[in-house]
Amino acid sequence: MEARKGSPNGDSHSEEWDHATWFFARGVGLLTSAEILAGVSEAKETLDTRVDVPRTTASLTGKIALEEHFALPDAADAAYNDQPTPDFRLQMLDIGDRRIAEMDRGGVEVCILSHTAPGVQGIPHVSEAIAAARRWNDYLVQQIARYPKRLKGFAALPMQDPEAAARELTRCVKELGFCGALVNGFSQVGTSDSAVFYDLPQYRHFWATVHELDVPFYLHPRSTLATRQQAYEGHEWIARSPWGFAVETSIHALRLMGSGLFDEFPKLQIILGHLGEGLPFGKWRVDNRIIKRKLATKAKRSRSQYLRENFYITTSCNFRTQALTDVMLEVGSDRVLYSVDYPYEFMDEASNWFENRSKVHGAPRSRYGPSLVDWPNTS
Ligand code: MN
């Protein structure tokens, strides 16, 4: 096992888990110390005095959640989720009191909001993508201004045009006060069946801008259904969030690593959701096979090193204690940040899992109808 210097990582799962809230405090501390979230209170004192007893309602206040989504009315219907209920659609559209009430229920003090997938990435027409990003960001900044201590923003970016994306990110950070960007995977550019990834040479200037601004870039998944892939044919569900999200995003992250991007811009910080899209679990084998097979990459360092120095990993929509333990062992607890993935997941369900650290997550509550009521207990 690899232990990070200065972290409380121990040599056993139980010791690791004793520090389950420590990583959150570090995460909050990191963001606040980086002045990404000016005015947000430091939650460490609350954490240190919290007793380890099972809870059924949120009591740990001050959490920051980074993968929380909204949609504009005219974009909501293009979201990867097919809006299973009218109420879910309302939750996605709401940037108001109902969302704040949900945050209160989950003990979340601050949400950094981002447009749900595929967002701007699903607009192949370049000038339309540029205009949409600007309009959506202007809308978001107006909405969150009503709750300045509770809501922050991640910029939507027209990655179809790297120069325009760099300009929009700069505007969003310097003029609108956004915390960084959240981009929904590859971009469709020109045609709907295209898929452009950001390790390509035309994006180096964009990354230089991210590096210079020193803000995080959240690489969020999108469905791979936009591009034809035989592996998914006849099994559309695999291409969606249950599995395809992790495949698409982990490949994209590996492309960034393998391109030498982090050698050129060593301060870049990418955020991955869903406990790292499988990368922490697979990183040893990836590096091992590259070395043993002498596989060529443009990177100067190992994937493990990049994952630990250029990536943060959030708990969004992956409320599984065993998996979280693996992430903490592999990348270090100070690289893990709390997130929910609202409204796809419930704020209170996430906090109940997070705060009941000895309790393994069981049956998810159903938002989509009665079919999940009989979901097998996964413990
Ligand atoms: Mn999400």
Image (tube, rainbow, N blue to C red):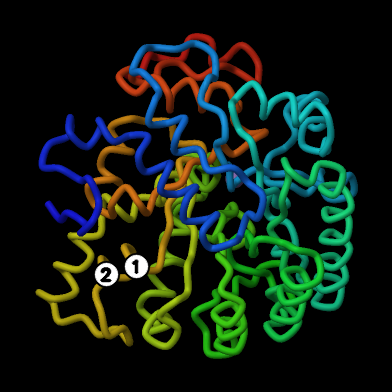
Percent x, y of residue 273: 49, 49
Mark 1 residue element? helix
- The x and y percentages for residue 93 are 83, 38
* Figure quarter occupied by ligand 1: top right
Left or right of 146, for residue 322: left
Look at 55% across and 76% down and name the residue there. 198
Viewer-proximal residue among 217 and 199 = 217
In depth, the one of 52 and 82 nearer the eye is 52
Q: Inspect the image, locate mark 1, and give the three-letter code of the amino acid beneath it.
A: Glu
What number is the disc on residue 3? none
- The answer to whether 354 is drawn above or below residue 159 in the figure is above
| The residue carrying mark 1 has its beta carbon less than 8 Å from ligand 1 | no
Q: Which residue occupies 75% across, 30% down?
A: 100
Left or right relative to 14: residue 360: right
Q: How many marks?
A: 2
- Disc 1 target residue: 309
Query: Distance from label 2 to label 1 (Cα)?
Result: 6 Å
Q: Residue at label 2?
A: 305
Residue at left offset 72%, top offset 37%: 82
Quadrant of image for the C terminus: top left
Type of amino acid under label 2? Gln
Q: Is mark 2 within 8 Å of ligand 1?
A: no
Which sits in the foreground, 134 or 132?
A: 134
Q: Which is nearer the eye, 51 or 153?
A: 51
The residue lying at 17 percent from left, 29 percent from top is 14
SS category of the residue bearing label 2: helix
